[in-house]
């Protein structure tokens, strides 16, 4: 049984052209004059318990809009939605107990209170038993390295500190599902790493189901086994990471360091991309030329002192995919 | 543990949230009392103006100064009873426009309860205090025998009046989910309640009384006060309406709350 299920989900934003002058509010209310944006356009997917899914797409693709429907913030224009047996926009309070949500752009903590106070309030609002609360908090403070700023008012926290606080607050009551909308945006490498570690551990040890939106492909490479790519409100790809790479970036690169300086390495099934001071970059398609055969062929003709194979990175794959779509 | 979603749970959650808001505003406490005092002063000057007028003319449509004081006290107390807890309603547009209403929709507490407890604002407490003082003074001076029945009716009328005014303001606030702007309408309606709610309806003639009954400003104070003073004979509307005024409040509020819940579905949030 899927934990999250959407079918033919649609969300249109209607922006009423505002009226001016007296009783503008009432007149705008009865106005029939609007422009419509179809932010989510017939999206269907299912997520099984324990999955960690990357929900990706360019700016304006409809990622945040989907997450806002899944959390109960927005009511769908049409389509079916089921999250842990609950229709989020109909049963918001029940849905709220099943989910944790973090928006990178916006904190859900109490701005004027020390961080620890926000945690206490969350603990009471979600009726977390004392011992569970203690155990979770201690663990999160440890993994996320929050010890030094627990008593600082949230308004004084740095972005990275606040994000870690938000993440801990979203997980204190052990929700089944965690939605992360750009949780690493604007963070330094160390803070990003802490957050990734936290998410990976929750998913692995606690079985928390995670839906992650990000523009940082390192987040995806590190965390996601499955991707859902969307654009203009429609699903482009839904599946594991590897086949996507194979389809959009089949080529690998073999980088060899040769004993003697060489301009072109002439081998069947490989193309010299670049050569520089004895270092040569060869592009090949592993489906036609297995790496082992290529290395054997090169070493039969040249003396190799060092070598490495680079995988295509996801960033490049997705860039290619979007470019290909745009040009169509 | 309380039953989830129940009224007991909502009250408990309100306590938790309001406690947080109080701790968050601790720094501005001195300020809070100043605004509260200013609120009380503002309301008192309103009555003083009326008093000056009455002192000149003796009475308004047969209502003596103490009669009018009772009406004014009931109006102001009812206003205070809704305005103290629902003060934050005026912020709904801000939350909708900024997209910060989001957070109220992802927590296991009624969004309205969360809105009401999101900040501490004591300016309307001044209205309530001024209203209670005026009501107390008027009650001891008017020519009414305060039997248990009359006291019970007064209490019901105060709650009913609070729900009439509160219900209308709640309903109007709900427009904000669609148009992002309801402040002006609410402000206008608030002025109507302030302007016409404080006088005996008979001043405005029969048509005026009907208009105020339908609006339904008259249910807040004029009609129940007429019952308490035994003046239902002079009403321009059927006297049964005056006796039913507490129920009208409950009905207005129930309809407004249902409307508010429906309008939340139109909340669009902010783009980012
Ligand atoms: N509250 C709103 N009112 C009107 N239009 C909106 C609103 N929220 C989003 N949109 C529109 O819906 C579309 C999808 O927006 P959404 O925020 O879901 O994109 P996204 O995939 O999260 O993008 P990003 O990567 O930039 O965060 C955009 O065209 C946006 O302008
Ligand atoms: Mg977004």
Image (cartoon, rainbow, N blue to C red):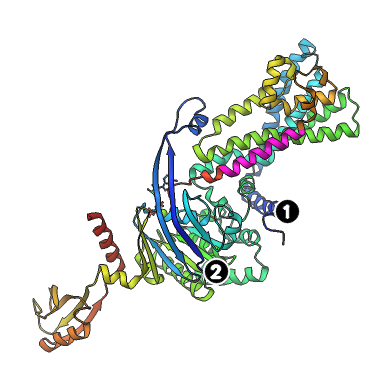
Residue at 71% across, 31% down:
B40
Give the quadrant of ligand 2: bottom left
Give residue A219's mark. Answer: none
Does A203 sit left or right of A120 as displayed?
left
Asked whether A164 or B166 is in front, the reply is B166
Label 2 environment density (alpha carbons within 10 Å; few <14, some 14–19, many ≥20): some
Asked whether B256 or A214 is in front, the reply is B256
Q: Would residue B256 be counted in the magenta stretch?
A: yes
Label 1 environment density (alpha carbons within 10 Å; few <14, some 14–19, many ≥20): few
Asked whether A1 or A286 is in front, the reply is A1
Residue A61, image x, y percentages: 36, 54
Residue at which label 2 appears: A141
Work out how far the residue at label 2 is from the one at label 1, CA to CA, in angstroms.
33 Å
Residue at which label 1 appears: B8
Residue A135, image x, y percentages: 61, 72
Residue at 43% across, 39% down:
A15
Does A166 sit left or right of A16 as displayed?
right
**Residue A119 showing in the rendered view:** yes
Task: Give the foreground label among 2 and 1.
Answer: 1
Q: Which residues are magenta?
A: B246-262
Q: Would residue A214 be counted in the magenta stretch?
A: no
């Amino acid at each position: 049984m899927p934990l999250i299920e959407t079918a033919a989900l649609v969300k249109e934003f209607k922006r009423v052209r505002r009226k001016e002058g007296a009783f503008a509010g009432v007149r705008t209310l009865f106005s029939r004059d609007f422009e419509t944006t179809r932010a989510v356009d017939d999206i269907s997917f299912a997520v099984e318990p324990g999955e960690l899914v990357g929900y990706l797409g360019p700016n304006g693709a409809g990622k945040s809009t989907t997450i806002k429907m899944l959390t109960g913030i927005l009511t769908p224009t049409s389509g079916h939605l089921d999250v842990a047996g609950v229709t989020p926009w109909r049963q918001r309070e029940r849905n709220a107990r099943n989910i944790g949500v973090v928006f990178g752009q916006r904190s859900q903590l109490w701005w004027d209170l020390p961080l620890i106070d926000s945690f206490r309030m969350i603990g009471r609002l979600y009726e977390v038993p004392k011992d569970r609360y203690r155990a979770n908090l201690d663990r999160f403070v440890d993994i996320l390295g929050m010890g030094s700023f627990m008593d600082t008012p949230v308004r004084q926290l740095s972005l990275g500190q606040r994000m870690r606080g938000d993440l801990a607050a979203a997980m204190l009551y052990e929700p089944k599902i965690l939605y992360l909308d750009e949780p690493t945006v604007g963070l330094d490498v160390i803070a990003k790493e802490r957050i990734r570690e936290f998410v990976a551990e929750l998913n692995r040890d606690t079985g928390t189901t995670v839906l992650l939106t990000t523009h940082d492909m390192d987040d995806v490479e590190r965390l996601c086994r499955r991707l859902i790519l969307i654009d203009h409100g429609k699903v482009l790809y839904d599946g594991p990471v590897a086949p996507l790479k194979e389809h959009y970036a089949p080529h690998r690169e073999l980088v060899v360091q040769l004993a003697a300086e060489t301009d072109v390495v002439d081998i069947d099934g490989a193309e010299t991309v670049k050569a520089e001071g004895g270092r040569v970059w060869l592009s090949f398609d592993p489906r036609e030329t297995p790496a082992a055969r290529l290395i054997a062929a090169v070493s039969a003709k040249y003396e190799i002192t060092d070598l490495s194979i680079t995988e295509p990175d996801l960033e490049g794959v997705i860039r290619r995919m979007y470019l290909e779509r745009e040009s169509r | 543990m309380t039953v989830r979603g129940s009224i007991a749970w909502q009250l408990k959650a309100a306590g938790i949230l309001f406690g947080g808001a109080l701790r968050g505003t601790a720094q501005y406490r001195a300020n809070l009392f100043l605004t509260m005092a200013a609120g009380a002063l503002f309301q008192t000057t309103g009555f003083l103006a009326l008093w000056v007028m009455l002192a000149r003319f003796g009475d308004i449509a047969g209502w003596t100064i103490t009669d009018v004081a009772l009406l004014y006290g009931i109006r102001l107390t009812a206003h205070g009873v809704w305005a103290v807890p629902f003060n934050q309603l005026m912020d709904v547009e801000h939350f909708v426009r900024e997209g910060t209403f989001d957070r109220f929709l992802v927590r296991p507490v009624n969004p309205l309860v969360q809105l009401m407890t999101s900040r501490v604002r004591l300016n309307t407490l001044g209205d309530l205090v001024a209203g209670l003082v005026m009501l107390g003074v008027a009650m001891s001076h008017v020519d009414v025998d305060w039997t248990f029945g009359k006291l019970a009716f007064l209490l019901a009328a105060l709650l009913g009046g609070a729900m009439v005014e509160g219900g209308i303001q709640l309903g109007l606030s709900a427009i904000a989910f669609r148009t992002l702007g309801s402040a002006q309408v609410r402000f206008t309606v608030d002025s109507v309640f302030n302007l016409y709610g404080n006088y005996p309806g008979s001043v405005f003639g029969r048509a005026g009384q009907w208009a105020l009954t339908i609006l339904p400003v008259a249910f807040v104070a004029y009609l129940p006060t007429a019952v308490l003073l035994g003046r239902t004979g002079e009403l321009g509307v059927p006297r049964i309406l005056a006796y039913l005024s507490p129920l009208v409040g409950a009905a207005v509020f129930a309809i407004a709350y249902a409307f508010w819940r429906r309008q939340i579905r139109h909340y669009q949030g902010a783009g980012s």
